[in-house]
Image (spheres, helix red, strand yellow):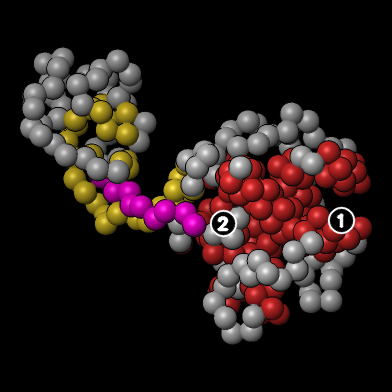
Amino acid sequence: MPNIQSIQKYRITEISPVDTTPSAKVGDIFEWDGIEDDGTACNDGVPKGYWFVHANTCHTKNRSRSGTWCKFEKVADPEPICTVPDPTPSTCVAGPLVTDACSRALDDMTHAERKARPIWRGVMQYFPKACECIAYFCFDYTWRTIEDLKNDILRMQLLGHYDHVARAAAILLQWELTDIKPARDQFEHGLYTNFLLPFGDALAECAHLSVVGNEQQNPGAPLHWDRSKSTDHGDSMVRHLKDSGKFDKDGCRHTTKVLWRAQAQLEIGLEQNNDR
């Protein structure tokens, strides 16, 4: 399971009078995971008590990069973040902020419909390693048609490239839901920029499938991935790919099940590789 940590927000209250080219202004908000002002004097003639803020991070005694000497104040209690386990540590904002990131997919839904699509609990906590892997993978090409993309998914499945399969499955579902042909990946790595933003609609439906499956297999139980049930992820993914574009008997799209199975397959594969 991911490790829950915290991050603190700060607001700039004063710019140093000797900073003639500040890159920020009073009122700007930035984040860092633990600032302690020891009161030591800064360099460049800046009076003590001012800190150097750069790119959402605070630095002291460092004028080599663009930034601002300033004073600041705390503006909120730390928000929870989730640190995805090794081998590639990174962070993703938890809870309501995940829903906000996917607001395009959830804006037109009722409160009950949004509650039935818990992206954080039903996708990112189910498949933390797979989400991380998908977020840091990019294609250097795109597809002319959905059929081309489906052919690629099967080819990559045969080759055992499960990271390719999972990202392609997310692209397939997003394409099907929005009817917007995907653009070529921009190689902007990260769970927010390369996972939540491009696949908001697909992730919402995948989370809903987790809820539906949990009720089918463990009625009344808290949302969780019961790994003892339905373990034939590769076979199921290919079967649902054949019927992609249609709805299954439970009301979920077959393409949603392609993505769910692709992430499960990748998650288990990554765990097994780590155990070796």
Farthest residue, direction front: 276
Point 66% across, 53% down: residue: 268
Q: Residue 162, image x and y in percent?
A: 74, 44
Q: Residue 267, image x and y in percent?
A: 64, 51
Relative to 113, does residue 61 appear above or below in the rendering?
Answer: above
Report if residue 142 is visible in the image: yes
Point 49% across, 47% down: residue: 85
Q: Which residue is mark 1?
A: 238
Q: In the drawing, does residue 165 fall left or right of residue 26?
A: right
Q: Residue 23, image x and y in percent?
A: 32, 26
- Secondary structure character of the magenta stretch overall: strand
Q: In this picture, which residue range is highlighted in magenta?
A: 1-11
Asked if the stretch drawn in magenta spans residue 10, the answer is: yes
Point 19% across, 30% down: residue: 51
Classify mark 1: helix, strand or loop: helix
Depth check, front residue: 64 or 213 = 213
Q: Which residue is mark 2?
A: 124
Point 36% across, 52% down: residue: 5
Q: Where does the C terminus fall, quadrant-wise?
A: top right
Q: Quadrant of residue 208?
A: bottom right
Label 1: few (<14), some or many (≥20) within 10 Å?
Answer: some
